[in-house]
Amino acid sequence: MKINEFDNSKDNVPITKKDAALYKQAQHMVMKSKVDYKPSVDTMVSVNKQMRDYVGNLDKDATKLSKAAGIPRDAVKPPAPLTQRSKFKNPFVRPQ
């Protein structure tokens, strides 16, 4: 069988408006969580203008697609924050 004879017809399902809106919302939430994090120590977060514009454009696209699909703008929940405090105790940490 040659590569061009491979049948992938079930993968050619068209993407719906809802799927596209949810994808953009998820993409925006992930990028926003990478830019707008709140560390436990005061640090300076430097994000260039191009990155802020990219995240802003993702927000605009997600809002526009959500309106077109008729779903709420906050249908995708933000990812869980990354913290230094783990609920699992590390056995290799020296007691204080």
Image (cartoon, rainbow, N blue to C red):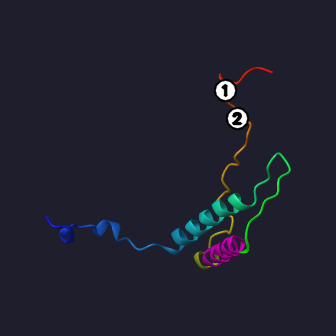
Residue depicted at 83% across the width and 53% down the height? 43
Which residue is tagged 2? Answer: 86
State the quadrant of the C terminus: top right
Q: Which residues are magenta?
A: 50-66
Q: Say which quarter of the image contains residue 64.
A: bottom right
**Nearer the observer, 69 or 61:** 61
Left/right of residue 28 with respect to residue 13 in the rendered view: right
Other residues around mark 2 within 10 Å, as few (<14) / some (14–19) / many (≥20)? few
State the quadrant of the N terminus: bottom left
Q: Say which quarter of the image contains residue 30.
A: bottom right
Q: Is residue 32 above or below residue 14?
A: above
**Label 1 element class:** loop
Are dots 2 and 1 in contact, CB under 8 Å? yes
Q: Say which quarter of the image contains residue 31.
A: bottom right
Which residue is tagged 1? Answer: 90
Provide the major secondary structure of the magenta segment: helix
